Amino acid sequence: MVTIYDVAARAGVSPATVSRVFAGQVNVSPDLAEAVRRAAAELGFLPNRGAQRLRTATSRIVAMMVPDIENPFFTAVTRAVEDVARAAGYSVMLCNTDEDPAREEEYLRVAVQEPVAGVVIAPSARARLGLAVDRGLPVVCVDRHAAGYSLDAVVADNRAAAAAATSLLLKAGYRRIACVTGPAGVETADDRLAGWSDALAALGQAPSADLVRRVPFTVEGGTAATCELLALAGPPDAVFAANNRLAAGTLAALAAAGRLPPATGVVSFGGSPLMLLAPPGVIVTQLPARALGLRAAEMLLERIAGLDGPARSETLPISVTF
Amino acid sequence: MVTIYDVAARAGVSPATVSRVFAGQVNVSPDLAEAVRRAAAELGFLPNRGAQRLRTATSRIVAMMVPDIENPFFTAVTRAVEDVARAAGYSVMLCNTDEDPAREEEYLRVAVQEPVAGVVIAPSARARLGLAVDRGLPVVCVDRHAAGYSLDAVVADNRAAAAAATSLLLKAGYRRIACVTGPAGVETADDRLAGWSDALAALGQAPSADLVRRVPFTVEGGTAATCELLALAGPPDAVFAANNRLAAGTLAALAAAGRLPPATGVVSFGGSPLMLLAPPGVIVTQLPARALGLRAAEMLLERIAGLDGPARSETLPISVTF
DNA sequence: ATGAAAGCGCTAACAG
DNA sequence: CTGTTAGCGCTTTCAT
């Protein structure tokens, strides 16, 4: 391995000077700096990050923790985080938590041990973040808040948008609107359910528990829930699907039953490539995935830079359109 | 920060003993080991990976480099790599190269500097991997070979499957079959084009350059290419789309033109959630994403473990079905 | 079975 | 502006 000592020897300077050159310090004469750079290039020298980190106790890595790397929403958020981080000279370490607090904690442990400079996380329902938070590692939440911790967070206005989308179904004339949402305790699942409920209540309808299904945020979950709903004595004439995967499952079930939109009204809360081929009449709300990621990354960089002060929570609007 | 010295002091042993306990060594008396573990737990001690790495020049991280993190194919491959790596005690650092050799090289530099234990990569068209390969960092290719390097690789049998899928279109009676594929130089794009060509040639058709479009592997690319093809004097009656994104774009264009399958034949080379809602008649080949990832990760772990010998190249079959 | 001590490669005082 | 030096936290001989 080539070290600063090798470079120093070749350039005829001290190791400290080599270090200074690579740190981009100004207190080095141009000719010496040039000599160092040439020697480094000839030797193929690359600074050892482990050593840098040990010495400085900082790194240029941020960890990004998402519950489902296969969901296009989270990849879009990740993409945005990566763009901001890269521009600031950070690499992103992406971790897939599977909505599992244990896996999440395992990755947080690694993040602490590494150590990374900070973490952006879409926390699972009962996330345990103490490991990182207690040690002062900057943590910013995205898409969801972390219950029990006061952390910076950027979320979307799920409740209002869910209400708006449901209202569109009502305006379109649908009257028996079901809600297929995620597990209790998952903030986005709960908020979207609440929005659905709001919209019905605003029209004087009492939201009926019969028409609510709680399933994992998966295509299969959406299909199963929709099949159940269709089999009811009084089946719904529309379905509010609380995320893109659930909507895919719902549409698949409706297709199988020959009741695709507009026969049945459908809201897909959150877009996906899938919706490109969705039948006309499906209401798709576009989540501000990129904006969420950008802002979360910015907030994290601010904290890494030492910003102090109370936790900030920002809520981004969601546009609801056909 | 809590160090082994703190733990040692509390447990009444030497730092070396603490190190031994955490390294899982046997040469420590059970009672001392217990004392160390208790002290560590009380202090919340976590070994500093930077220091470990500096000392041992190894790490428990593998880098995974993909050209497009938003493509479900690559997330599925990544998922598989992660599963294998995690089971072996490694964390996965996911890097998005955007099909850009410069970005790729940048990430490889980080991988070398870190250092990571090894890298799994779906290399871009003219990948420069010397930075890592020259230093002996284990690198395994997945989905594509790396031109100019002799590296372990696991790929799918694209050419044969492309031919098989195209043959299905021919059997279904389509006679003017276009090919929408990716950029020249991208192995998967070229191989799938070759397979398309093979199938036509087998039926005595001369593959016509008029019916071939080379575009980026994106939905937009697929839409644009298909629109062009439809506008030809002699438009195709079927389209072989060489990847899932292109197929989505193709279907969108066909929908807009009112020529959805079965009016127009379509092959989607590679599945995606999108195809759940695809009109009947679309031929979808399921790529062995998970198998590719699993095998690549296994091969990498073998190399990390010190396996020597010539580069191995494995080709996995692709099942072609409706 | 345990401890003492010497670094891994780098940075940051502190001198000069 | 440049060099000397002392660690960062850990592992690993080498003694004991």
Image (spheres, coloured by chain):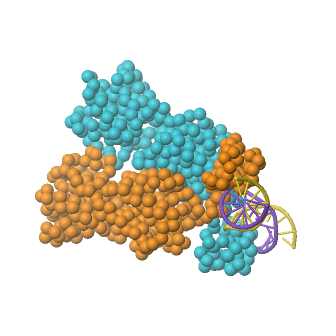
Chain colours: A orange, B cyan, C purple, D yellow
* Residue at point 57%, 39% (across, down): B128
In front: A202, or B121?
A202
Horizontal and vertical percent position of residue B243:
39, 39
Does residue A197 lie above or below B120 as drawn?
A: below
Quadrant placement of the C terminus of chain B: top left
Of the 4 image quadrants, the one containing the N terminus of chain B is bottom right
Q: Closer to the camera, B24 or D8?
A: D8
Q: Residue at x 16, y 63 (%)?
A: A176
Q: Nearer the viewer, residue A105 or A163?
A: A163
Please say if B169 is above or below A301: above
Give the image quarter of residue A244.
Answer: bottom left
Spot occupied by residue A16 in the image (x, y as percentages of width and height): 71, 56
Q: Is residue B82 above or below residue B125?
A: below
Residue plotted at (25% across, 65% down)? A160
Q: Give the tally of numbered discs.
A: 0
Going by the image, does A98 lie left or right of B115?
left
Name the residue rendered at 46%, 68% in the picture.
A101
Residue A70 seen in the figure:
no
